[in-house]
């Protein structure tokens, strides 16, 4: 998890790589409502939210137009190419994971990622988690980056954050949805920095096993609390925010996923909370 917002330049825009088809690199996320539908263009690997699209004609499956750019480095010609490739998307509908191939867990994809990272399946204790097919833009995290959540988790998060604020407790998002590929990238960067795989897998779940894939999990921080530690530090357990979450998180459907000595072999993560509602 990078703790500083990544600087990006036009020369490194995710939409300017000449050898990669847009349709292979982008995800179109339906959100809004049937009467007022919008789509979010997200880069699959990095998780960056690039733009918001809308339809000019609700009766036609074509006609997507860009209504907002979330990434200033997205060039007009590249964005137009992306829209053309994504313009054949079906009308907005609430689909289940079983109905949407991209959101269904790909055993083959996970096996390839593990092979690329030299992960022995015997090293992985956590269950496999499918990537969510229903993601909604939730706003900005504590680093100013856009984040996505499953609509059920997002609604519960908004209620919980507002209730905590009414009790004088600040909560903000450090990390939310992550794709398989993004999780693999986190691990690969640590390997390149010389860290051993067993140590990495105690801190970062293997691709395909992170609760973040579900769109239900949140890493939380309390930036406005005096003396608060940096994000993703064990000292978060000594904050008023953690005490409030421990007392009231379950009232909003959230629970601590990785307590001390958890069966998944992960380090203690007092900042990681997952919404346990059923993703339909």
Image (cartoon, rainbow, N blue to C red):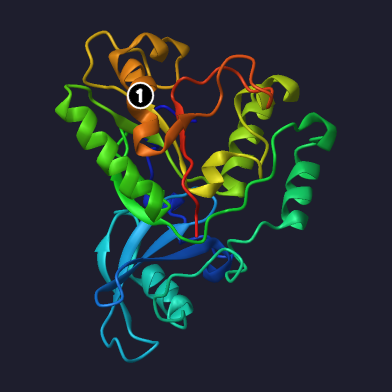
Rendering quarter of residue 114: top right
- Furthest residue in direction bottom, as rendered: 59
Q: Is residue 40 left or right of residue 264?
A: left
- Which residue is tagged 1? 245
Spot occupied by residue 121 in the image (x, y as percentages of width and height)? 82, 37
Residue that sits furthest to the front in the current view: 251
Q: Nearer the viewer, residue 10 or 184?
A: 184
- Helix, strand or loop for disc 1: helix
In the picture, measured across the screen, residue 56 lies left or right of residue 42, that is: left
Q: Residue 267 placed where, x, y %?
A: 60, 18
Q: Residue at left 73%, top 46%?
A: 113
Number of other residues with Cα within 10 Å of mark 1, as a class: few under 14, some 14 to 19, many 20 or more = many
Quarter of the image where one finds residue 258: top right
Measured from the top left, where is residue 162 in percent x and y? 20, 36
Residue 259, image quadrant: top right
For the point 54% across and 29% down, the residue is 257
As drawn, 21 above or below 264: below
The total of numbered circles placed on residues is: 1
In the image, residue 28 above or below residue 207: below
Position above or below: 118 against 203:
below
| Residue at (41, 12) in percent of width and height | 237
Q: Position of residue 268 (x, y in %)?
A: 56, 17
Above or below residue 53? Residue 244 is: above
- Of residues 138 and 186, the one nearer the viewer is 138
């Amino acid at each position: 998890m990078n703790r500083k917002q990544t600087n990006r330049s036009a020369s490194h825009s995710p939409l300017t790589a000449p050898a990669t088809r847009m349709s292979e690199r982008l995800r179109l996320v339906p959100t809004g409502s049937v009467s007022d539908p919008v789509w979010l263009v997200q880069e699959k690997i990095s998780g960056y939210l690039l733009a918001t699209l809308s339809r000019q004609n609700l009766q036609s499956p074509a006609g997507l137009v860009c209504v907002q750019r979330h990434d200033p480095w997205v060039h007009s010609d590249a964005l137009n190419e992306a829209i053309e490739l994504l313009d054949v998307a079906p009308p907005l509908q609430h689909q289940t994971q079983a109905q949407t191939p991209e959101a269904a867990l790909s055993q083959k994809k996970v096996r390839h990622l593990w092979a690329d990272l030299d992960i022995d399946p015997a090293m992985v204790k956590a269950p496999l988690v499918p990537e969510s097919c229903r993601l909604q833009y939730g706003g900005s995290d504590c680093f100013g980056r856009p984040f996505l959540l499953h609509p059920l988790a997002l609604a519960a998060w908004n209620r919980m954050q507002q209730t905590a604020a009414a009790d004088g407790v600040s909560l903000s998002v450090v990390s939310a949805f992550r794709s398989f590929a993004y999780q693999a990238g986190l691990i690969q960067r640590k390997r390149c920095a010389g860290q051993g795989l067993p140590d990495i897998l105690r801190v970062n779940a293997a691709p395909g096993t992170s609760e973040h894939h579900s769109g239900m999990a949140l890493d939380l921080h309390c930036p406005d609390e005096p003396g608060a530690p940096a994000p993703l530090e064990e000292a978060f357990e000594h904050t008023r925010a953690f005490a409030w979450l421990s007392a009231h998180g379950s009232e909003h459907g959230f629970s601590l996923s990785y307590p001390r000595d958890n069966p998944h072999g992960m380090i203690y993560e007092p900042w990681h909370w997952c919404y346990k509602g059923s993703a339909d």
